[in-house]
Image (cartoon, rainbow, N blue to C red):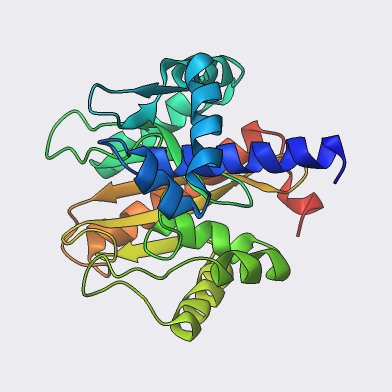
Amino acid sequence: MSQEESKVKSLDKALTLLDLLAAHDGGMKLSELSQAAGFPKSTAHALLSTMRDRGVVSQLDTGAYILGIKLFEYGAAVSRGFDIGALAKPYLERLSALTGSTAVISMTDNRGVVSFDHAFPSGGVRVMPQIGVRLPLHATSQGKLLLAYLPQRTKDALLKRSRLVSFTPHTITDRQALCRDLDDVRAKGYAVEDGEYKIGLRSVSAPVFDSTGALRYALTTIGFFRRAVSEDFLAAVMDTVEQAKRMSSALGYLQESHP
């Protein structure tokens, strides 16, 4: 094995450990990380020690490892590089005012969806979105939107390694049923979550495209709507789609050029 191949594999293993820590708020001990990652304790310890020295992870008095402050610095640097926050803000605020519900903007890539900003209505019940957390693809409108617009091979690979966990009695856990739902999303141009992630909550997400026609963001309305066919929810669908179209135009997307 070449030195370059070894470095790449070590990096991949380090990122696996970080993914595990990100999913466990209370931290994980060496033995737990080693078992969950499938690495020898010596390998996990060496990687964690290096990352601890660089501030990427921290170790509590209990011996458990948690994510370190250095990652927050990296995240802040990433945020500074995005003008999308400033661009999205008026669309979020307008959508929230129109629907009387929480508006959320999420970033998409070939691995998943992460929400990074939101706006609340001036009155009523506020729904606090999960900011900075990778959302389940099969149980949220943002995730289903991404899956619907991914190339078939990428979507198949992503679904193959994803567990269709049941969050509520309404969560779609059958792959064929999910694929039919995704076809419907693509045909309509928006995705709906009907109590599939959290009981009582319903959301709609519409695609935000960039100048190349690629799906870059998901614009979402989420709230305690009575039913997915109620008048207020259907109005929220229209408002969300419209604001997503306007935001796409602001990013240089020309629908005529990208059928």
In this view, the residue farthest toward the front is: 42
Q: Horizontal and vertical percent for residue 191?
A: 45, 62
Examine the image and state in which quarter residue 173 appears.
bottom left
Q: Horizontal and vertical percent for residue 85?
A: 50, 23
Which residue is at a point 56% across and 63% down the rendered structure image? 147
Residue 257 visible, this angle: yes
Q: Horizontal and vertical percent for residue 30?
A: 38, 39
Which residue is at a point 58% across and 68% down the rendered structure image? 186
Residue 243 visible, this angle: no
Q: Horizontal and vertical percent for residue 220?
A: 40, 47
Q: Is residue 65 above or below residue 35?
A: above
Examine the image and state in which quarter residue 157 appears.
bottom right
Which residue is at a point 81% across and 42% down the rendered structure image? 5
Examine the image and state in which quarter residue 87 appears.
top right
Q: Is residue 103 above or below residue 87?
A: below
Q: Is residue 186 above or below residue 244?
A: below
Q: Nearer the viewer, residue 171 or 201?
A: 171
